[in-house]
């Protein structure tokens, strides 16, 4: 009986201890994200719209973004780097507009991406969203290479 | 079954099994699209199939946990459920929410709508109204269960089970917080996903296993309960900071690579402790329980969870490895064996144990049930191996060599064919299991050793 109540108290006390450390560290990480690793000021209405479209269409259930999501289609966290042009900031927007229009390819034996019928504004938002994500400073600059 | 209200569990498990069938069918469909990518690509795109697969999984596992609680709590607290009406009411609420989510996904209803549209974050896609419904149902459930525990005997098993269920509901609330900043969004998203499966759900799993082993082996309650506290302590002490293994590459500080690697490696220990626990109890316990199939599932659960979560988790949890494997088929391999081994199996163990009592008869269809265990366990193991190989090849070609994603996927075709084969066998096993539970027939094994509840 004694050892059981001791075990119980260790369980409660220890869990609370680790939970507090965890909350403390995530609070610190929250600040780090807002002030250091991401461009908080750069979250424009366009970026917001892009994130909303990303969620409304559930793109994440085919694609990964920063390595999280589904494994059916290419990583998109760095797509603005892969498909963009350092010297021409609008090049990626144009690429994405073309890409979204061309879907589905209907190519036989190739995975398909649906036609989403997005407005120009929505596609532009998505492009700004991907560019914003591409600039997040990740540890060791993950992903290892442009393929994502 | 000593208490009338334990019968509630039957309704929960019936709905859970229907969703289990739906879940694996859509999994198989997704596996088929991987092989034949033009199939249904316009009618039902892959992302919708995947949402149905993963959401059906989460919902049926939670329904199973609730059903288990409605069975376990009366026996542990030695009193009837506080209000069976609330119990059935919250089940109906959850069914309505589930149907609502399915209709929303499949017919793409109210797209973009704040309240009614789907919310495309992995696993948390349910429209806002469904999420709110889930919270209401969860509160009703917790009220009902807590009141039952409060008026009766308090045991370690009900204590830990209750804590796990409260934790499940509390961490779900972080799913309502969707910051515009994607890095923040991801950080809090893991509060739900990781702190569920590698935190509070482990409490639920440990307490259900403890209940089963107590009943099946006849070992002294004192011994079982000491084990339970040791296991859940190990779970939370490692699992909470273990969340760090998801904070490597999403814009979070670099110290997480060390905290995540160290603490998530320690997460293997509680899963190993569950293996020791279940085998020690079965060895030590003098009771020759007639429900052999339930014993098999309880032992199988701890072993498969150890491999799926422990071994396959450790495989890619060190940050040096995860740098390359993050978000590849290696993750899918681990996700499948871990979910199946831990949470699917614990639910199937529970239903195997309780169904004879719910149907008021001796254990039945045990051979069939045990056959289904071996079919599911081996086909899931095979699927895991196949996806692991696919993931290793993908990691090398894409992450090390830098080859284009689609070009790499083309080279993995054979693995996906084998995954589909394994998946088909798994679905067959699941159907045999359901048949063995819901179509009671003559028993082949002697049940002379008396069921002692
Ligand atoms: C009880 C059995 C099963 C469980 C617990 C389960 C669980 C899961 C989970 C958790 C995911 C998300 C994976 C992740 O994000 O890492 C997933 C995805 C998936 N599952 Fe299953 N699943 C089961 C059965 C099946 C079966 C039988 C098939 C058939 C081949 C299947 C095919 C798939 C596919 C194709 C995906 C999508 C993978 C991707 O994103 O590329 N699953 N499943
Ligand atoms: C029963 C317990 C567990 C379940 C159900 C589970 C399930 C999952 C699932 C579904 C994912 C994919 C999440 C996503 O979609 O992004 C995942 C990721 C991961 N899990 Fe687990 N897991 C469990 C335990 C563990 C343990 C004990 C470890 C470590 C020892 C671990 C290590 C990992 C790692 C490192 C990832 C990230 C993979 C990546 O970088 O893509 N898991 N887990
Ligand atoms: Fe995790």
Image (cartoon, rainbow, N blue to C red):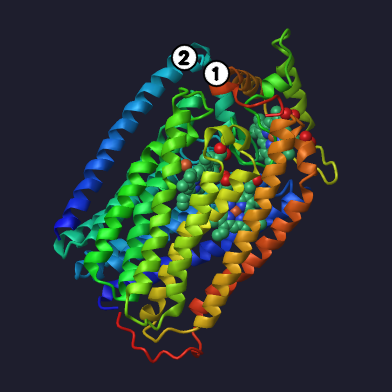
* Disc marking residue A36: 2
Q: Horizontal and vertical percent for residue B278?
A: 38, 66
- Label 1 with label 2: CB-CB less than 8 Å: yes
Q: Quadrant of residue B91?
A: bottom left
The residue where tag 1 is placed is: A137
What element does badge 2 sit on? helix
Q: Nearer the viewer, residue B423 or A108?
A: B423
Say left or right for B1 vs B299. left
The subunit letter for the residue under badge 1 reads: A
| Residue at the image position 49 percent from the left and 81 percent from the top | B366
Identify the mark nearer the N-term, 1 or 2: 2
Q: CA distance from mark 1 to mark 2?
A: 8 Å
Query: B310 or B453: which is nearer to us?
Result: B310
Q: Is residue B115 above or below residue A53?
A: below
Say which quarter of the image contains residue B361: bottom left
Q: Residue furthest right?
A: A108
Placement of A20 over or under A108, stated as above or below: above
Specify whether tag 2 is near ligand 2 (CB below 8 Å). no
The quarter of the picture where the N terminus of chain A appears is: bottom left
* Mark 1 surroundings within 10 Å by alpha-carbon count, few (fewer than 14), some (14 through 19), many (20 or more): some
Q: Is residue B122 visible?
A: no
Subunit that carries the residue with mark 2: A
The local crowd at label 2, few if under 14, some if 14 to 19, many if 20 or more residues have their Cα within 10 Å, is: some
**Position of the C terminus of chain A by quadrant:** top right
Place of residue A69 in the rendered image (x, y in percent of width and height, measured from the top left): 58, 38
Q: Position of residue B57 (x, y in %)?
A: 51, 55
Taking the spot 42% from the left edge, 74% from the top edge, the residue there is: B295
């Amino acid at each position: 009986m004694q050892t059981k109540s001791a075990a119980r108290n260790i369980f409660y006390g220890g869990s609370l201890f680790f939970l507090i450390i965890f909350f403390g560290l995530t609070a610190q990480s929250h600040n780090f994200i807002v002030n250091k690793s991401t461009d908080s000021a750069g979250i424009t209405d366009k970026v917001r719209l892009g994130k909303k479209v990303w969620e409304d269409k559930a793109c994440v259930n085919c694609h990964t973004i920063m390595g999280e999501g589904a494994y059916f289609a290419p990583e998109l966290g760095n797509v603005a780097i892969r498909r963009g042009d350092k010297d021409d900031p609008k090049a990626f927007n144009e690429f994405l507009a073309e890409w979204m229009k061309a879907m589905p390819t209907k190519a036989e034996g190739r995975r398909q991406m649906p036609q989403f019928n997005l407005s120009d504004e929505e596609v532009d938002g998505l492009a700004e969203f991907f560019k914003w994500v591409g600039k997040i400073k990740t540890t060791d600059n993950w992903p290892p290479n442009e393929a994502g | 079954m000593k208490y009338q209200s334990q019968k509630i569990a039957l309704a929960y498990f019936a709905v859970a099994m229907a969703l289990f069938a739906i879940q694996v069918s859509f999994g198989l469909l997704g596996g088929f699209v991987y092989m034949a990518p033009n199939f249904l690509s316009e009618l039902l795109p892959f992302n919708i199939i995947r949402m149905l697969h993963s959401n059906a999984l989460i919902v049926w596992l939670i329904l199973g946990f609730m059903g288990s609680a409605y069975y376990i709590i009366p026996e542990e607290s030695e009193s009837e459920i506080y209000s069976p009406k609330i119990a059935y009411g919250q089940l109906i609420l959850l069914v309505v929410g589930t149907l609502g989510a399915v209709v929303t996904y499949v017919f793409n209803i109210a797209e973009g709508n704040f309240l009614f549209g789907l919310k495309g974050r992995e696993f948390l896609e349910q429209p806002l109204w469904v999420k709110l419904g889930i919270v209401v149902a969860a509160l009703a459930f917790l009220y009902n269960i807590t009141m039952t525990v409060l008026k009766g005997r308090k045991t370690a098993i009900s204590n830990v089970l209750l804590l796990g269920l409260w934790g499940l509901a509390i961490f779900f609330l972080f799913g309502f917080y969707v910051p515009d900043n994607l890095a923040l969004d991801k950080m809090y998203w893991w509060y739900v996903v990781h702190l569920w499966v590698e935190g509070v759900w482990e409490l639920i799993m440990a307490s259900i296993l403890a209940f089963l082993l107590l009943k099946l082996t006849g070992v002294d309650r004192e011994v079982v309960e000491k084990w339970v506290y040791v296991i859940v302590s190990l779970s939370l002490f490692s699992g909470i900071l273990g969340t760090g293994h998801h904070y490597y590459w999403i814009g979070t500080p670099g110290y997480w690579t060390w905290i995540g690697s160290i603490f998530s490696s320690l997460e293997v220990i509680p899963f190993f402790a569950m293996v020791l626990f279940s085998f020690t109890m079965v060895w030590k316990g003098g009771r020759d329980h007639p429900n052999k199939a339930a014993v098999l599932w309880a032992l199988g659960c701890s072993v498969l969870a150890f491999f799926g979560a422990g071994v396959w988790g450790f495989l890619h949890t060190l940050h040096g490895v995860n740098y390359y494997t993050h978000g590849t088929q290696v993750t899918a391999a681990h996700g499948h064996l871990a979910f199946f081994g831990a949470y699917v199996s614990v639910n199937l163990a529970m239903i195997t144990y309780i169904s004879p009592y719910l149907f008021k008869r001796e254990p039945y269809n045990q051979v069939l049930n045990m056959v289904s265990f071996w079919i599911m366990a081996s086909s899931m193991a095979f699927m895991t191996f196949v996806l692991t190989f696919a993931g290793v090849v993908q990691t090398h070609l894409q992450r090390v060599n830098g080859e284009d994603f689609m070009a790499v996927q083309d080279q993995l075709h054979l693995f996906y064919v084998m995954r589909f084969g394994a998946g088909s066998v798994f679905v067959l096993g699941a159907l045999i299991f359901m048949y063995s539970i819901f179509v009671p027939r003559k028993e082949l094994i002697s049940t002379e050793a008396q069921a002692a509840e």
